[in-house]
Amino acid sequence: MATTINQLASVVVLLGLLITLKQEFTVAQTGVCYGREGNNLPSPAEVVALYNQNNIQRMRIYDPDQPTLQALSGSNIELILGVPNTDLQNLASSQDNANTWVQNNVRNYPNVRFRYISVGNEVSPLKSDTSQYAGFVLPALQNIDNAISAAGLGNQIRVSTALETTVLGKDFPPEDGVFKDEVRDYLNGIITFLVNTRAPLLVNIYPYFAYINNKANIDLQYALFTSDGIDVGGGIRYQNLFYAILDAMYAALEKSGGSSLEIVVSESGWPSAGGDTTSVDFARTYNTNLIQRVRDGTPKRPGRAIETYIFAMFDENQKNGDEIERHFGIFTPDRQPKYPISFN
């Protein structure tokens, strides 16, 4: 009898270990952002097929494009669905507007695996092109979250917003990370909302831009995950710039009442052409190493996989901004990989 009990106990322990490993593997699955600012891109159905062929199990889109949502139905690909910045005022102004948005873009697609809704992308009161939207982010978050809860989906879908790391006033050493004084009032309401709803904060993290803007002090290999790392004191060593930026964001959150929050890296990548320190080889090195490194934790949060989304699936030849903005794709528009990359 004792042997049987011990065997059962061993089975329970093994099952628990397998469940834990499966959860960690699932979190570590790297997704890819699917932008559509191009006139030569494949159809949404072809894109979904390409995700499946390459075992890419998560996608981020930036607006509720109906053909894309239709193509995702039944695919089992988990989705971050974006609310465009231009829609924020409408959703902030009325709960009915938010209810209608959720009905049209979420409830009408019961076979799409929505994971998060990103209410706005990189809105900051400090940026001339987004400052006009800053006052609408929090009420839009609240209205969309209310609509999701009213639809009975509150346990399935988390509502958040995506920030960029320029909101940091200090980011090195990472433990000294703090938000700029000018954005604290804006962020405090968002952080309180996320803490109360237990949703993660979405953050777009680009070591490429951090390196380009500070080449005198940042080593290229450190940005590409290929250095031995640097000591920051207290026996702590950072192997790469990605970890350092992420932990600076965590430190800033802790100083702003957000110590319980998880960060989902909603964009990260390296351009393959179009500017300083861009090449297919640099992009391959960065993205290949990123997929490996996010399976591990940072010095601040060791042993915890980092949910991450590579930007982007394709080069987008109509994307605004500098030339490099059009060269972040890991696939060419004819669906060929620019370089070998594995999501298994």
Image (spheres, rainbow, N blue to C red):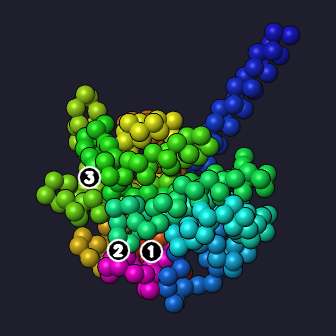
Say which element carries label 1.
loop
Can you say whether 186 is above or below 88 in the image? above
**Observer-nearest of 107 and 238:** 107
Mark 3 Cα shell of 10 Å, populated few (<14), some (14-19), many (≥20) = some
Q: Report x, y in % for residue 157.
A: 68, 53
Say whether residue 217 is left or right of residue 149: left
Q: Report x, y in % for residue 142.
A: 62, 53
Residue occupying the point 35% across, 70% down: 128
Instruction: State whether residue 310 appears in this view.
Output: no
Q: Residue type at mark 1?
A: Gly
Q: Earlier in the sequence, mark 1 or mark 2?
A: 2
Which of the labelled discs sits on residue 329, or is there none? 1
Seen from this angle, which residue lies furthest left? 216
**Observer-nearest of 176 and 243:** 176
Which residue position holds label 3?
A: 222
Seen from this angle, which residue lies furthest front? 93
Q: Residue type at mark 2?
A: Ser
Say whether residue 154 is left or right of residue 57: right
- Span colored in magenta: 313-327
Q: Quadrant of residue 188?
A: top left
Estimate the spatial distance between the alpha carbons at disc 1 and disc 2, rounded to whole Å.
8 Å
Q: Earlier in the sequence, mark 1 or mark 3?
A: 3
Which of the labelled discs sits on residue 272, or is there none? 2
Residue occupying the point 49% across, 77% down: 314
Principal SS element in the magenta part?
A: loop
Estimate the spatial distance between the alpha carbons at disc 1 and disc 3, rounded to whole Å.
22 Å
Say whether residue 139 is left or right of residue 210: right
Residue occupying the point 61% across, 64% down: 93
